[in-house]
Image (cartoon, rainbow, N blue to C red):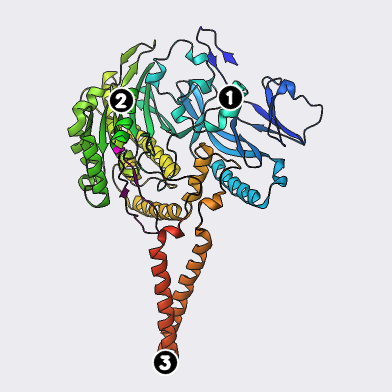
Amino acid sequence: MEIGSSSDKIFKLYDQLELLEYQDKFVVKSLESPDQGFSISRREGNIETLSDASSSEKPSKTSAIYGVAGTIRLLAGTYLLVITSRKEVGSFLGFPVYRVESMKFLACNEALRFSNSQEKRDEAYFMTLLKTVEATPGLYYSYETDITLNLQRRCKLMEGWMSKPIWKQADPRFVWNKHLLEELIEYKLDEFIIPLLQGSFQMAQLELKNSPTTCTLLSRRCTRRLGTRMWRRGANLEGDTANFIETEQLLELEGFRCSLLQIRGSIPLLWEQIVDLSYKPRLRIINHEHTPQVVERHFHDLFQRYGETIALDLTEKHGDEGQLSAAYSAEMQKLPNVRYVSFDFHHVCGNSNFDNLGVLYDQISEDFEKQGYFLIDTDGNILEEQKGIIRSNCIDCLDRTNVTQSYLARKSLNIQLQRLGVFTSTECIPLFAEDYGKFRTLWAEQGDEISLEYAGTHALKGDLVRYGKQTVAGLIKDGMSAVSRYYLNNFHDGIRQDALDLVSGRYTVSRNNPSPFQLNSFESFSYLPVASALLVGGLTLTTFTIQQAGRSAQHYVSSVFWAGVTAGVMALVKANGRQFCSRPRLCGLL
């Protein structure tokens, strides 16, 4: 439906929905407009509008839902994804924003009973992936506005744009469920189609010198190279990079609105870092004849969208990182319109010298301040435009990147508040302890959420953002997160990568495709328990027999034997580390 009386009416989605479960179908309808809705067959998965699917039968169950996130077709039929709980987390430009708290896939696949044993096994694996999708963190949406477009782009849209269905307004790069919405779009169910954004939404109320100010931090994850930390690195041949995120810091004060954009993304070369049970797997640069074109495509796309780009490389200058950084630097020398800045974060800042980022700022401050920020007044008149962008990267584009982006955001915030007359030319936000604490918390919480989506854990170095220094509690938390990352990357992320490839449409389920179990012939999880049992058993028996070794020659021989078995198993596992890790079955690396 449409609301508003101006010539540019606002399109609004139905936000109160009812799910009715019948023996042969599911029905979704609006509580606001009970005649508006649709049904989906539980046998064939066919969709019909509510007018064509009227039923006098009483539903077996009725429940409230908060949105339909889409449909997906697997071997045995269709699954409908619905939002079962939500939480209001703030507002974007005056419109309420919600975070998805829980989702559920509803099976419309009675054809499963007619499938053969291999198809049932495949479908069971796909259903496991759907369970993983249901637990996806960091999904946000609004019923009244599109949140995928930044303020500067919104202000330049043609008149009447806001009256379009929200899914048509959205930037497709940032629509997490774009692939899932295709069938709903085909049936023109515009009032039910919710574009979900994955990323982070943080909001704080500041009281700067008695000037009530709202600071919002909105990060938008690109879906073009969606994936997990170790299974999606670098760029694909189209120039899309892993963990590409646009972050917008929005300041609202007395009717004025300021917006600063920054972006992050994996180093745009072809490279990989395959898990192999080691704590830090080796990086491998993939030599490809089209690498220069990949880099050029990536930065051409950035220029078209954001203007002149400063590429800020925060990686180390030695070891594997150094080789990757050198290869990146060599390619960047071939691009005349991009400024490349290399800054070894670990060398200059160490683990706690956050203020040493001033060394970096001195190098880029002139260009950064020249790029500026976007500013509109109470009447929507454009007073300032952002003319370029900072693109930051480390290896994961998480911890070092988040610390650096928060530093640059703080510098820009000071400039904006001076421009609006809140601060004098000598004042800055660190002088206001309570408000500065809120600002740093925004960036720390955002860093944790983005890291959770890509790496499966909270961000490291969060203390540098939250407190400006490393604390003992922070060191302990970082240690626990590092161990969790190791476990998840080695033993869980293969399945999580498959789930992302499935939900994003990168892998399409078809009876003509080979079984996922044929795509990966080595069953890592069937070998891992055996290897683990042999290691634990061998260590236990070795310890026991060593204790008894002095009593007889037989005990001595036994201890030597079990020590040899244990060493042999350890050598086997080390030599075949990749085979014992969780690997994606559905798609390759690029």
> What's the CA distance linking mark 1 and mark 2?
31 Å
Disc 3 marks which amino acid?
Answer: Ala
Sequence order check, earlier mark of 1 and 3: 1
Based on the displayed image, in which of its 4 quarters is residue 397 positioned? top left
Sequence order check, earlier mark of 2 and 3: 2
Sequence order check, earlier mark of 1 and 2: 1
**Label 1, on which residue?**
185
Disc 2 marks which amino acid?
Answer: Phe
Kindly identify the residue that appears in the image at 62 percent across and 47 percent down: 123
> What's the CA distance linking mark 2 and mark 3?
76 Å
341 over 275 or under it: above or below: above
The one nearer the camera, 558 or 96, is 558
Q: Can I make out residue 258 in this image?
A: yes
Of all residues, the one furthest to the bottom in this rendering is 552
Numbered range of the magenta stretch = 269-291
Q: Quadrant of the C terminus?
A: top left
The one nearer the camera, 238 or 90, is 238
**Label 3, on which residue?**
553
Instruction: Say what secondary structure mark 1 lies in.
Output: helix
Magenta-colored stretch includes residue 274: yes
3 over 204 or under it: above or below: above
Q: Quadrant of the N terminus?
A: top right
Mark 1 and mark 2 in contact? Answer it, CB < 8 Å: no
Mark 2 and mark 3 in contact? Answer it, CB < 8 Å: no
Q: Position of residue 503 (x, y in %)?
A: 53, 38
**Label 2, on which residue?**
303
